Amino acid sequence: MDGNQTLQSYRQCLKAATGALLVETGFEACDKLALETVTELLQSFIKELGRSSRAFCELACRTDVLGADVMLALSEMGSPPLGLKEYALR
């Protein structure tokens, strides 16, 4: 598989995960364009979370990102990690 096919594969996985999240939150149907838009938003959120986590890691003079860096990044982005552990354990 070349790089473009790999990216498309990741995008399809993210789109499926986005659809599952929408179903879990109570949506019964979704327009294809709306699903694509929400998937793009989720991709941007994950990218920014990674960038911000890396910045906190480098600020602490480390090379490996820790969970604490991700938690700080989430809080700074306005998404406090309250209930995240319980959600992950479900």
Image (spheres, rainbow, N blue to C red):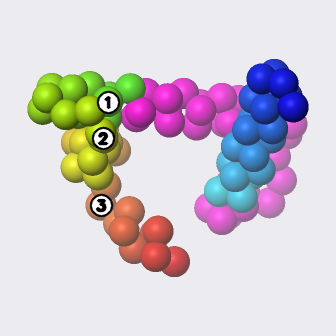
Please say whether residue 36 is visible from this viewpoint.
no
Whole-angstrom CA distance, mark 2 to mark 1, is 6 Å
User: Would you say the residues marked 2 and 1 are in contact, meaning their CB atoms lie under 8 Å apart?
Assistant: yes
Q: Is residue 17 above or below residue 54?
A: below
The kind of secondary structure the magenta stretch mainly shows is helix
User: Would you say the residues marked 3 and 1 are in contact, meaning their CB atoms lie under 8 Å apart?
Assistant: no
Q: Which residues are magenta?
A: 22-50
**What amino acid does circle 1 point to?**
Arg
Mark 2, residue position: 65
Residue at 50% x, 36% y: name it: 46
Q: Nearer the viewer, mark 3 or mark 2?
A: 2
In the rendered image, residue 59, in percent from the top left (x then y), is placed at 15, 26
Does 21 appear in magenta? no
Element marked by disc 3: loop
Whole-angstrom CA distance, mark 3 to mark 1, is 21 Å
The earlier-in-sequence mark between 3 and 2 is: 2
Mark 3, residue position: 82
The earlier-in-sequence mark between 3 and 1 is: 1
Mark 1, residue position: 54
